[in-house]
Image: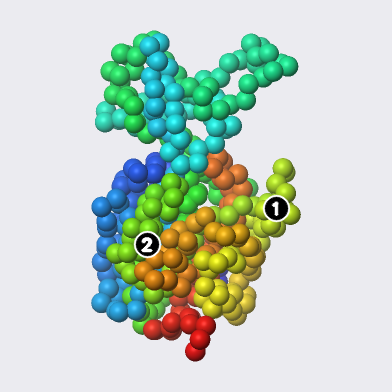
Amino acid sequence: MSTKSILKETSIAFLEQYLNNASPTGFEAEGQKIWMDYVKPYVDTFITDTYGTAVGVINPDAPYKVVIEGHADEISWYVNYITDNGLIYVIRNGGSDHQIAPSKLVNIHTKKGIVKGVFGWPAIHTRLKDKEENPKISNLFIDTGCETKEEVEKMGIHVGCVITYPDEFMIMNGNKFVCRAIDNRMGGFMIAEVARLLHENKKKLPFGLYITNSVQEEVGLRGAEMITKTIRPNVAIVTDVCHDTSTPMIDVKVEGETKIGKGPVITYAPAVQNNLRELIINTAEENKIPFQRMASSRVTGTDTDAFAYSNGGVASALISLPLRYMHTTVEMVHRDDVENVIKLIYESLLKIENNETFSYFK
């Protein structure tokens, strides 16, 4: 299967719609509906749970179950306090970056619809140069153009309303995908493309495949923690993002050396089952898929951990997509890496044998 043929125009159209739609942690349902509509022709049935995780299932009656997984949620903010003169103070929903907030346009989600606001910031002329304050949660505020608290509340804004950035998808220099929320709706996109390729190439799997788009990863892997107990899988291949460490101000001796355009990143970590990881590496080598390696101390910090340590232990592995500028509104990935992650997951599934235990003690 040539990587050139993997992404169709319809794939990119879906990606753009899926990324542009807001899907903040705890409020992922509208994005999940877009995802399920796209995946529907390629699966036999769906599982959804109380908090909104969506799973497309192929061969639902098969006893041996394999998960491929990404997470659906994006970081955001909550309205935390409204001042008498109509300014809004916020708290994080996930790991939102306080340093990028000043002067950003925002969407405040209310029952009446989206209200626009801006993260205000004092003009450079008014700041004391010798002791400038840096952006932090305590001094970030949103201005909606209202003059009183009552005016803000009349727009439908109240404590607990969620706030996202409106930045939308673009393709830069022909082969770089740029958007907010690539972490990790690109994962949801890539597993959807695996489902499409299996269907279009008429591949029959000997096991049940659970294409899992989990919620609430950004606040502690919560959606994966819930859905793994429902599915009770035998194997889980998780895809998330990792850092491109080739850009300025990153120490490769600390963060490792990974770069966009150089291929999927395969992780070594206690939660990663060694035999499953080696199957993936062998798959990459046999199919001439470029890949990189990284090591994670103690935990991967991804849904891999939630699957691995569930249900008495699930053979789990992590295939990451290198990403520049994580948790900003200009997250950037390379199209070649996206296509190679899709190809690596697809080819790894074809290599997994039914009822494989991945035991170290055969």
Disc ID at residue 8:
none
Residue 193 percent location from the top left of the image? 43, 63
Q: Nearer the viewer, residue 325 or 170?
A: 325
The disc, 1 or 2, on the residue closer to the chain's N-terminal end is 2
Q: How many marks?
A: 2
Q: What colouring method underlies this structural image?
A: rainbow
Q: Is residue 14 above or below residue 249?
A: below
User: Residue shown at 55%/67% (left/top)?
Assistant: 270
Q: Quadrant of residue 58?
A: bottom left
Disc 1, SS: helix
Residue 245 percent location from the top left of the image? 68, 51
Q: Nearer the viewer, residue 221 or 208?
A: 221
- Local packing at callout 2 (Cα closer than 10 Å; few below 14, some 14-19, many 20+) is many
List the residue tagged with mark 2.
212
User: Residue shown at 42%/71% (left/top)?
Assistant: 313
- Local packing at callout 1 (Cα closer than 10 Å; few below 14, some 14-19, many 20+) is few
Q: Would residue 18 be visible to someone looking at this image?
A: no
Residue 291 percent location from the top left of the image? 63, 67
In the image, farthest residue toward the bottom: 362
Disc 2, SS: strand
Q: Nearer the viewer, residue 2 or 118?
A: 118
Q: CA distance from mark 1 to mark 2?
A: 31 Å
Kind of residue sitting beneath label 2 = Thr
Kind of residue sitting beneath label 1 = Val
Q: Is residue 241 above or below residue 130?
A: below
Q: Is residue 214 above or below residue 163?
A: below
List the residue tagged with mark 1.
254
